[in-house]
Image (cartoon, rainbow, N blue to C red):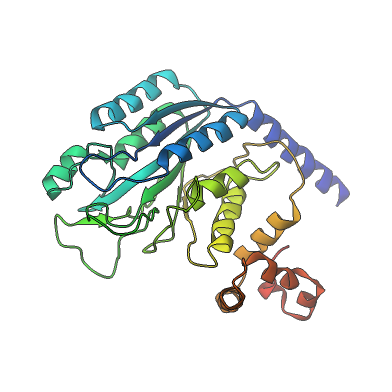
Amino acid sequence: MMRRVVLGLFVWLGLVSAALAEKRVALVLAAEDYSLIRPLSNPANDARAMEDLLEKLDFEVFVETDRDLRRMRRALEDFKADAAGADVALLFFAGHGVALDGVNYLLPTDADGSSPEALAATALPLAEAQEALRAVAPVAIVLLDACRDDPFSGGGTEGRGAGALDDTAPVPAGTPTPGLGRIGRADGFLFAFAAAPNETASDGEEENSPFTAALVRHLGTAGVELRTALTLVQQDVYDRSRGKQLPYIESGLPELVFITGEGVLPERDQLLIAMADLTPDLRAEVETLATERNLPLAPFTQPFCQPIWATRPPKTAPAC
């Protein structure tokens, strides 16, 4: 038994060491100064925050902000040329995003929402960005802090997120759908969206959106595998929004991905991970308590991680 544990430890350390030796590249895109649709407040700040974070994680970072469609496409072509041969490629986008006739689009600053045809002609299909990442590295991470509320209205809130299309209600042909549709199978890709399907994400009242702020806090958590780090991001946003917003992840990665060295998980992060294992009924109880007391969610999960769980069936106890 001890031999297997020691062997497993060496394998894990080998994975972490290999990860630290990888060539990592990132393209950070942000659009807020829209000329024909509703502008946003925080994407440029989000881009700067992600640039700082990714550089600390040993990524070579390329940043483009407030680009029109031509220059956004040029940024992708330059990225393909400059970053070719990397082990891990990451794309971060902050700005507006919509779905039109089943196609996901990221909107550059000159996107024209006057008609479906104009929109399709002036927006960047997400598939183009995917192909650029696929040409650069076998492992791709896509982080989308894209607007989910209607960017074509004169008013409205400034929420950002990426919801999925409503599978139960047909969308008329040519109708733009705020948010992005489900990706489906994409081998070698991991997608993280700012909000769960069909839900709205906040743009934030501070310098960064809640999703980007949580990425900055948790993506670089030492010793944590990428998907676990994103679970921390999910639960942090969920906690701080008191259950109103939960980021959404689709993963087609067939292997573990580490982007930091070893470390000890802080107690708060352990609580956030524990929240991910709460049953729907318990989650509803926690949300109700948090709303009634106007407090974050994480403290309410702490009793669930205590020995009281020993009296419950193991399948219902969250891992702490």
Compared to residue 99, the image places residue 74 above or below, namely: above
Foreground residue among 25 and 200: 200
Left or right: 271, with 239 as reference point: right
Compared to residue 147, the image places residue 320 above or below, namely: below
Can you give x and y, in whole percent of width and height, for residue 301 in the image?
A: 68, 69
Foreground residue among 161 and 38: 38
Q: Residue at x 73, y 80 (%)?
A: 312
Q: Residue furthest right?
A: 2
Q: Quadrant of residue 237?
A: bottom right
Can you give x and y, in whole percent of width and height, for residue 156 in the image?
A: 29, 59
Q: Quadrant of residue 293?
A: bottom right
Left or right: 11, with 114 as reference point: right
Compared to residue 136, the image places residue 220 above or below, namely: below
Q: Quadrant of residue 125?
A: top left
Can you give x and y, in whole percent of width and height, for residue 217 in the image?
A: 61, 46
Foreground residue among 183 and 51: 51
Query: Which quadrant of the figure contains the C terminus?
Result: bottom right
Compared to residue 34, the image places residue 150 above or below, namely: below
Q: Residue at x 27, y 48 (%)?
A: 38
Q: How many marks?
A: 0
Q: Residue at x 37, y 48 (%)?
A: 146
Q: Residue furthest top?
A: 82
Can you give x and y, in whole percent of width and height, for residue 108 in the image?
A: 28, 37
Foreground residue among 212 and 171: 212
Q: Residue at x 40, y 42 (%)?
A: 94
